[in-house]
Amino acid sequence: MRSRAFVTFISVIVALVLLAGTCSAGFVAGRMYNSPSQVLALLPGGISATPAPQGAADTPKDLQELFTPFWQTWDLVHQEYVDQPVNNETLMRGAIRGMLESLGDPHTSYLDPEEYKTLTSQLQGEDSYEGIGAWVDTTSDFLTIISPIPGSPAEKVGLRTGDKIVAIDREDMTGIDGELVRKRVLGPAGSLVTLTIQRAGREPFDVKITRAKITVPSVDARMLDNNIAYVRLLIFADNTKDELEKALKEQMAQNPRALILDLRGNGGGYLESAIDVASEFIDKGVIVSEQYGDGTKRSFDARKGGLATDIPMVVLINQGSASASEIVAGAIQDLGRGKLVGVKSFGKGSVQIPTPLKNNEGAVRITVARWLTPNGRTIHGVGLTPDVEVQITEQDFAQNRDPQLDKAVELLSTK
């Protein structure tokens, strides 16, 4: 397997963590795609008096003609914009970002150097950050909570999946790019931020959150009543396989009668990690397939040596379960390994390739494929429908009840 300098995204949108800008990414090592120089060469020079990108002189004449308006605009900005001098690096980054946004795919995007660095940090083993501690979706009309991290300030003040941040410190965020809003929420431990939250069924309300240093685990495991093992995955990271194996060894040593795998609020991670996790519960068969634009497919099979391939199990999902979570849950459902309990999952089923750009200018990530469940189901934009649907009501939240977990225990206790 090649270096993870070139990896494959499978995660939800840019499901970013409001910590130090870390995101729930979806990486897998493997394939080399177009080089950064090939990406940069898509901005050819022609008539501009401003220096054009390296390699532009070799651009075909038809593309030089196509980009004549671009360089005309470039010159006009340098000559006429009211605040001079303009920053060429900022213009270059904006051009790349705009080009990718024009495709209409929220998962195909530009990551500036800071975003790219923080993108990879958590999934590569850096597990402490400062912020409010919540996975968020930056592609909606407002910055939207996917899931608060257990024990985080976001969880302690009661933020929930689906909450929209409509104002920060009383400043309206309407129409402001989600990535800019995310950066506004970030801040050092001990600092205070006031978020105005729009939640379904309620009038907007304010919450005051003291930012903190947050440690993000991959796995949380314990034994429940009725001798049922409970394992919650928070992210599919580099260290998830090892943490899960350790947790399963400890749980299985107690000879549990059944097991609950909780994927609620898990926005994704490495594809490699998703296959490893699924293989702990599935002994054979296809876990997931990738469908490319030319019609070709690539399948990934279960790996041998799973620690919990026979024990009765239930998987918990909700609207915050996305991407790698849906790969695991979809495989377990399609192969008849266990039932899904909860509500419909997020529905993120595309594959991205992030390519670092030259001169440490960040990276671009391009959607190259869709993934399919073992039975050939497309999840993208659809999600997984649970076998047993269980909602969590406002009253459940208020009284700290978890009817989804209760239903899972009930199903397994009757077997």
Image (cartoon, grey):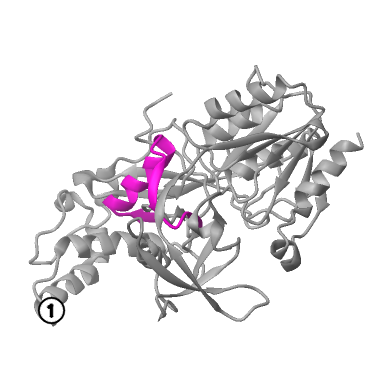
| Apparent side of residue 217 relative to residue 397 in the rendered image (left or right) | left
The residue located at (9%, 60%) in the rendering is: 51
Magenta stretch contains residue 132: yes
Toward the right, the furthest residue is 414
Q: Please tell me how many numbered marks the rendered image carries.
A: 1
Which image quadrant: the C terminus?
A: top right
Name which quarter of the figure residue 289 lies in: top right
Toward the top, the furthest residue is 305
Three-letter amino acid code at the position of disc 1: Asp
The residue located at (43%, 39%) in the rendering is: 123
Residue that numbered label 1 is attached to: 83
Between 169 and 176, the one lying in front of the other is 169
Between 336 and 92, the one lying in front of the other is 336
Which image quadrant: the N terminus?
A: top left
Tell me: residue 47, above or below residue 288: below
- Label 1 crowd (10 A; few <14 / some 14-19 / many >=20): few
Tell me: residue 95, above or below residue 314: below
Tell me: residue 395, above or below residue 295: below
Boundaries of the magenta span: 109-135
Local secondary structure at mark 1: loop
